[in-house]
Amino acid sequence: MKEKYYKLSPFVHQLPLTNNEYQTLYNALTLGLVVVRKDVVRAINKGLWQKINPATLRHLQMIKAVILTEETGFKELQKAQKFFKRNILGVLCLMLTESCNLRCRYCFIEHKFPKGHRFNSMNFEMAKCGIDVFIRHLPESLENGLIDPTVSFYGGEPLLNLPVFEKSLEYIAVQKEKGKLPSKTFLTLNTNGTLVSSKIAKILKKYEVSVSLSIDGPQIVHDLARPDIKKKGSFHRAIAGIKLLREHNVNVGISCAVAMHNLKNLEEISEWFMDEIEIDVFGFNILVVGGLPEPNFDLNDYSLQLGEKMVQCFQIARKRGKQEERSFRLAKSFADGKIHYYDCSACGQQLVVDPRGRFGPCHAYLHEEKNFVSPDYSINLFSHSLWQEWKKRSPLNMKACLKCIALGICGGGCPYNAEVREGSIWKLDKGFCPFAKSMTKFLVMEVAEKAIMNYNKGC
Ligand code: SF4
Ligand code: SF4
């Protein structure tokens, strides 16, 4: 039998354990690992079914056979415990401006400003401070296993602050030349795409910036939720932006916010992205609290539907060798057998610099003093209490998650949503859980079906 065996099931396989082993293995099992003896796995892998106790075999079939050996079970547990001690800062998010030329209905940034608010924009000194602090944290992060340091430019609409954007890119390029930033440092721009010009596309190409451009689907859907400040749809301008970027060979992916205007058609929208926009990678974003109120919005309905549809979209994309990023992340963690500790880099791995120059882990607190601190060149984010707390915010440290089927691959969704809806970042992000659970069930069932098919063939 050639199947690879995966962890991640909440089911417990009973083993004869010594007293000393019991507590450790119990802990491993609460991490969502199924543990069996090594000789059982060896026999399964060699197709020597007769060597396995029939009761064990029946049990493994029943629980859909998601397996770790005792040995790897212990190792996995130790790894998980060590993980939270590692210092890693992998993402610098520069919020270049609060201002935006669009007023997307669900935007958690623009709708929260009071009337008459004077929008702040970052100056270069603030950006430089963020970049320098990020650089200072990199050697330790790389030593601790960071693979892809990322600087992401965010807003509002970041292209409204083009001078600081360009100057920051120049500064980053110099730091790369000096060897202070790894040459592989990944640069990304999150934009609505409507302001992209040839000049901007050339800048993006010159500095090898990848673009994540927001499109919600075909025009009829997109324009429902993404009007400009004059209430005009932004679809054609966004599509023109993609075209220009492509003409200049800029790497473009699509970011699609999922709200009530497009939820029902998510499968068709996935196909449209691949067929009409010819995109290889797109990502669905689960709503962050803070947009305009939706009259018929029900969180439970939204998240249940979203969970089911995301599984469908994952399959649609996979069939064509393409990716929906959010579901792909979970599937990859499952296939690689690696725990997905966080689904959001704000969990201790990210420095956000806001348009006033403040430092924080998450951009969504922009309108508050909470979760932001004053800029400080000498700050140590690894020992700062704010980043330390966010770093621990993983389902693996949350009691409500310990018996969940999705524990190992979930990552825990959005702590900000959990706080706004439930009062603390340590609560569940209930808009996210159904998605993580649906995805896990689908993946487990898929593996199980193949395993059982192979088992039946071998009998
Ligand atoms: S906590 Fe939520 S809003 Fe903040 S960065 Fe993470 S996903 Fe975004
Ligand atoms: S966050 Fe939700 S889906 Fe994820 S492990 Fe916790 S309970 Fe399960």
Image (spheres, rainbow, N blue to C red):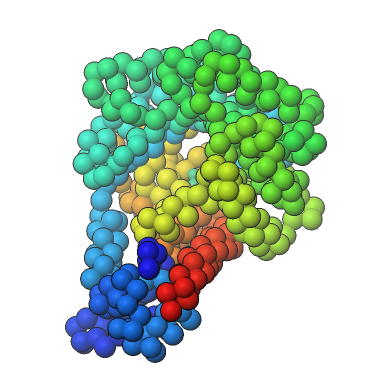
Give 284 or 360, whichever is nearer the viewer. Answer: 284
Q: Is 283 rendered above or below residue 14? A: above
Residue drawn at the location 52% of the way across and 19% of the way down: 249
Residue drawn at the location 67% of the way across and 42% of the way down: 271
Give 386 or 390, whichever is nearer the viewer. Answer: 390
Q: Where is residue 37 in the image (x, y as percent from the top left)?
A: 27, 78
- State which quadrant residue 247 falls in: top right
Q: In this view, does 21 lie to the left or right of 266?
A: left
Q: Is 144 rendered above or below residue 103? A: below
Residue drawn at the location 62% of the way across and 49% of the way down: 316
Q: Quadrant of the C terminus?
A: bottom left
Q: Position of residue 141 (x, y in %)?
A: 26, 41
Residue 98 can be seen in this image: no
Q: In this view, does 39 lie to the left or right of 303?
A: left
The outermost residue toward the top is 199
Q: Quadrant of the N terminus?
A: bottom left
Q: Is 45 rendered above or below residue 235? A: below
Give 104 or 290, whichever is nearer the viewer. Answer: 104
Q: Is residue 416 left or right of residue 455?
A: right
Give 35 or 389, whichever is nearer the viewer. Answer: 35
